[in-house]
């Protein structure tokens, strides 16, 4: 196995921002327009903790009418980014559909001694604070309960995009190491959740905060100090 290759499938409800997140990472591109995806693939290289990784990203269909076209090969990914829209409560419920498929895949891999897939939940559109329907705490608890990491992101304002993918990479590296060391049990929820998680909803305005390109947030910084929401 080539350890530098990591496949990531981006999934979630229609319109939650999967393509916007993916295009931000791949091309630093942003558009207000909404063009529902059927399926798009991208390759991108990133250096995380001094190691270069080749990421193969699959941006999948969220709209229900296109979900039937979901390739079963998407489930073979090393990692899943499960995206919801913080301004649309139904988009978090919609993640149950994807989570069920991923859980079945996880069981199969554990049964066959494979590496279980890494799962990170992203609450996107965190720039739209006035329209927020889901507290960060709600998303975090949803993610923790399902053994997923958690981030809030904004594709529009480029908040936590690089950080989310760096987290995915680190978790895949950890999962592979764990499996190589003979520990095949599913990772503990607390090990999968983001360190320094919030104890309560809090205002997150950080005016004048700038994020260096390709910034890798140091792990000791708190979740909230890395979460720059307007
Ligand atoms: N304000 C704001 N709008 C966003 C953000 N991310 C995406 N959008 C907008 O939300 C709409 C849908 O975004 P897409 O990225 O196409 O959504 P998608 O999840 O790929 O949708 P499907 O391909 O149908 O599954 C577009 O109009 C985007 O401009 C964000 O972080 N903030
Ligand atoms: Mg899309």
Image (cartoon, helix red, strand yellow):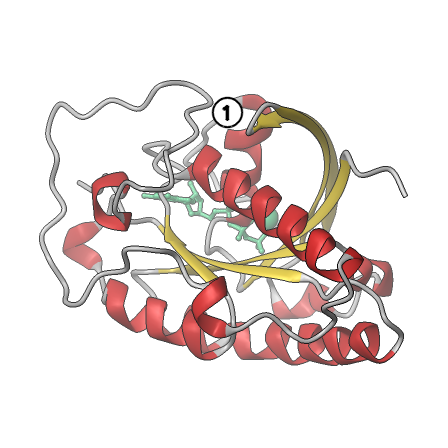
Location of residue 218 by image quarter: top left
Q: Is residue 216 left or right of residue 138?
A: right
Q: Residue at x 90, y 43 (%)?
A: 1
Location of residue 87 by image quarter: bottom left
Rendered position, 43 above or below 224? above
Classify mark 1 as within 8 Å of ligand 1 or not, answering yes or no.
no
In what quadrant of the picture does the C terminus appear? top left
Q: Is residue 123 left or right of residue 17?
A: left
User: Which residue position is annotated with label 1?
Assistant: 29
Q: Residue at x 47, y 43 (%)?
A: 164
Q: Is residue 152 visible?
A: yes
Q: Is residue 80 left or right of residue 83?
A: right
Q: Residue at x 57, y 38 (%)?
A: 22
Q: Residue at x 60, y 63 (%)?
A: 63
Rendered position, 45 above or below 112? above
Rendered position, 211 above or below 91? above
């Amino acid at each position: 196995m080539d350890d530098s290759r990591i496949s990531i499938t981006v999934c979630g409800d229609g319109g939650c921002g999967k393509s916007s997140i993916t295009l931000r990472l791949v091309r630093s591109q942003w558009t207000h327009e909404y063009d529902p995806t059927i399926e798009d693939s991208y390759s991108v290289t990133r250096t995380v903790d001094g190691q270069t990784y080749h990421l193969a990203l699959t941006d999948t269909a969220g709209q229900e009418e296109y979900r039937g076209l979901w390739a079963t090969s998407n489930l073979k990914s090393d990692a899943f980014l499960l995206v919801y829209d913080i301004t649309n409560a139904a988009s978090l419920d919609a993640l149950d559909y994807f989570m069920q498929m991923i859980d079945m895949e996880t069981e199969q891999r554990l049964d066959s001694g494979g590496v279980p897939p890494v799962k990170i939940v992203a609450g996107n559109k965190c720039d739209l604070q006035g329209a927020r329907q889901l507290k960060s705490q709600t998303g975090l608890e949803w993610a923790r309960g399902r053994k997923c990491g958690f981030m809030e992101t904004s594709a529009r304002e480029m908040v936590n995009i690089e950080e989310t993918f760096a987290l995915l990479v680190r978790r895949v590296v950890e999962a592979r190491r764990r499996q190589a060391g003979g520990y095949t049990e599913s990772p503990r929820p607390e090990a999968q959740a983001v360190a320094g998680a919030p104890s309560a909803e809090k205002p997150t305005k950080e005016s004048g905060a700038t994020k260096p390109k390709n910034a890798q947030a140091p792990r000791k910084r708190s979740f909230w100090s890395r979460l720059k929401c307007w």
